[in-house]
Image (spheres, helix red, strand yellow):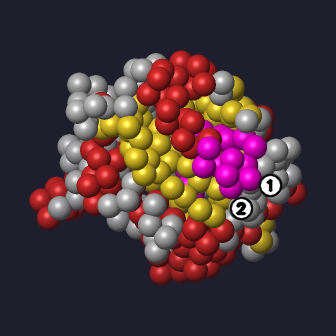
């Protein structure tokens, strides 16, 4: 076996084609778009290069067939917030061979050590944690857009190298047509009608205002969590730009108290239902198919992120936002499921909210950590 850095069009193609080779007989796997993956490794497209660095490799067998891949990266904003300087690895794919996996892990580890790192988390993304984050260990069903999917044996490969679970990521599923529990509805309706509370959905015409509101809420809501780094406006603008093609303005809601931004939820139609037959490609034919499928609509949504300012986290605003969503979604008679993904096992408040809605378990991912 030979490990090589990605250094040209041929190796880039190998990096993109490998999952298609590995998962060709797996009916659940849905290929991410090649452009989405390549943009992560493009300094002109990924703002994380402004405060980090990244590299990647491909592993070949003696016949020149790609049998594994991995990327390693350092986010300088987060790397030194841990007890030990910690880098990341991701986009790991490999045949079921511990030797092959160890070669990939070793290459990434060596590179990270040379950059001063003493530990690595993976599989994670060189970007925000709403996409390509975590090792799937339970719930091997078709993934929603941006969610990691992998073979069950990957957990053994990670453990075999010495990775241990750092935390769990829970994804729950909410049946759209099923009524909310009575207590949840009662609280949500009471909150929605309280004086001073107002609710608005996102508007592309006023995108700048809503991006600012989201940034204000998000950075306040998450400030007390370990290793939190405030999100920047340029990062949010980039995220909304990526969502623009599939975005439904009335699936993104904000709550205000006397005009002050207090809470939000961002939900998008599941683009994977639109691109599952594209095999990662986005040529003219695929674009036409995408437009048609976007017009026809899909039956699953994904809640990417939600947050509430610390001062308002016991006001029931999240419940009211779910009511506002349902008031829009139910009459459309289109959506069957809302995927609530993902919540860390350290986030008791959000897990309690999921339970209160009547959501049921969907998937479990692990973020793994290897100490050098």
Q: Nearer the viewer, residue 361 or 184?
A: 361
Q: Nearer the viewer, residue 144 or 174?
A: 144
Q: Position of residue 81 (x, y in %)?
A: 82, 53
Q: Residue at x 12, y 59 (%)?
A: 285
| 225 lies left or right of 173 | right
Mark linked to residue 55: none
Q: Residue at x 69, y 33 (%)?
A: 370
Label 1 packing within 10 angstroms: few (<14), some (14-19), many (20+): some
Q: Are marks 1 and 2 in contact (CB under 8 Å)?
A: yes
The secondary element bearing badge 2 is classed as: loop
* Residue 320 seen in the figure: no
Label 2 packing within 10 angstroms: few (<14), some (14-19), many (20+): some
Task: Tell which residue pokes out farthest to the left in this image.
Answer: 285
| Structural distance between the alpha carbons of marks 1 and 2 | 7 Å
Mark linked to residue 80: 1
Q: Position of residue 89 (x, y in %)?
A: 57, 44
Q: Position of residue 222 (x, y in %)?
A: 78, 54
Q: Specify the quadrant that holds the N terminus.
A: top left
Q: Position of residue 343 (x, y in %)?
A: 65, 38
Residue 262 lies in quadrant: bottom right
| 257 lies left or right of 252 | right
Q: Residue at x 32, y 55 (%)?
A: 12
Residue 52 lies in quadrant: bottom right
Q: Residue at x 35, y 65 (%)?
A: 245
Residue 276 lies in quadrant: top left
**What are the residue bounds of the magenta stretch?**
110-127
Q: Which residue is mark 2?
A: 76
Q: Nearer the viewer, residue 305 or 73?
A: 73
Query: In the rendered structure, does residue 147 fall within the stretch colored magenta?
Result: no
């Amino acid at each position: 076996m030979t490990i090589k850095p990605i250094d040209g069009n041929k190796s880039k193609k190998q990096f993109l084609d490998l999952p298609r080779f590995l998962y060709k007989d797996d009916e659940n796997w849905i290929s991410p778009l090649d452009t989405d993956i390549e943009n992560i490794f493009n300094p002109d497209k990924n703002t994380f290069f402004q405060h980090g660095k990244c590299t990647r490799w491909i592993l070949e067998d003696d016949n020149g067939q790609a049998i594994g891949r991995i990327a390693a990266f350092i986010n300088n904003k987060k790397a030194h917030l841990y007890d030990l300087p910690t880098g990341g690895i991701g986009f790991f794919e490999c045949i079921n061979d511990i030797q092959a996996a160890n070669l990939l892990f070793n290459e990434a580890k060596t590179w990270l050590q040379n950059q001063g790192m003493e530990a690595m988390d993976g599989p994670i993304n060189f970007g925000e944690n709403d996409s390509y984050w975590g090792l799937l260990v339970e719930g091997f069903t078709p993934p929603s857009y941006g969610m990691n999917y992998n073979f069950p044996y990957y957990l053994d490969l990670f453990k075999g190298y010495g990775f241990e679970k750092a935390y769990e990521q829970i994804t729950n599923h909410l049946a759209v047509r099923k009524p909310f529990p009575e207590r949840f509805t009662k609280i949500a309706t009471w909150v929605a009608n309280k004086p001073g509370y107002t609710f608005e959905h996102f508007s592309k015409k006023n995108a700048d205002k809503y991006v600012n509101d989201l940034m204000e809420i998000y950075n306040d809501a998450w400030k007390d969590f370990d290793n939190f780094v405030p999100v920047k406006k340029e990062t949010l603008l980039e995220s909304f730009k990526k969502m623009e093609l599939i975005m439904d303005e009335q699936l993104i809601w904000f709550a205000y108290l006397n005009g002050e931004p207090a809470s939000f939820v961002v939900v998008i139609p599941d683009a994977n239902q639109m691109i599952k037959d594209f095999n990662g490609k986005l040529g003219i034919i695929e674009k036409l198919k995408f437009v048609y499928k976007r017009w026809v609509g899909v039956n699953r949504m994904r809640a990417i992120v939600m947050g509430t300012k610390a001062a308002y986290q016991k006001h029931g605003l999240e419940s009211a936002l779910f009511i506002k969503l349902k008031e829009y979604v139910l009459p459309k008679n289109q959506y069957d499921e809302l995927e609530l993904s993902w919540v860390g096992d350290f986030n008791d408040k959000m897990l309690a909210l999921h339970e209160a809605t009547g959501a049921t378990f969907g998937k479990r991912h692990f973020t793994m950590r290897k100490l050098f």
